[in-house]
Image (tube, rainbow, N blue to C red):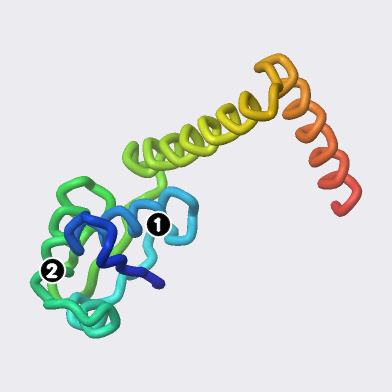
Amino acid sequence: MQIHLSPGDGAPIYRQIIRQVKYMVGVGRLQPGDELPSVRALARQLLVNPNTVARAYRDLEAMGLVISQQGSGTYVTDAGSPLARREKLRILRERADALLVEARQLGFGLDEVKALLDKRDAAMETETKKSA
């Protein structure tokens, strides 16, 4: 699991860890049942105090994203988690916002963006059928 801390981020380290784990679950890099590194191992990797990682893991567990099993480890919960779906929607919303902002800056309207998306979707469907 690759987590990158940014001292200039402004967010506390434990929140950076939470945000990145949520993102990895949301985009499917971490699957249900995947084990997270131990608190000590991740603290060593990130060069932070183990208490910082422990706090992030506790908060992730309180959110229902992971489950800790005493003596066994910390695991990603099932994909049916509403948090995972909310995180995926958040990511998609951010990308949609960025697309719409860029389209407007380039002088394209919503109808043109929708038409382009429909064309791209059809092209991807065709490619998927060809490769199957």
Tag 1, which secondary structure? loop
Picture coordinates of residue 40, whole percent (x, y): 18, 81
The type of residue carrying mark 2 is Thr
Q: Is residue 46 left or right of residue 120?
A: left
Residues 17 and 54: in front is 17
Q: Residue at x 45, y 35 (%)?
A: 89
Q: Identify the image quadrant of residue 116.
A: top right
Left or right of residue 48, residue 65 in this image:
right
In the rendered view, would you say 130 is above or below 114?
A: below
Residue on which disc 1 sits? 32
Amino acid type of the residue tagged 1 in the rendering:
Pro
Give the residue number, with chain letter if any, for mark 2. 52
For marks 2 and 1 on the same chain, the one whose residue lies earlier in the sequence: 1
At x 35%, y 58%, the residue is 20
* Residue under the image location 13 percent in, 71 percent down: 70
Taking 3 as reference, is 63 left or right?
Answer: left
Residue closer to the observer: 49 or 79? 49
Neighbor class of circle 1 (other Cα within 10 Å; few <14, some 14-19, many 20+) is: some
Helix, strand or loop under label 2 = helix
**Rendered image quadrant of residue 125:** top right
Estimate the spatial distance between the alpha carbons at disc 2 and disc 1, rounded to whole Å: 24 Å
Q: Position of residue 101 (x, y in %)?
A: 56, 29
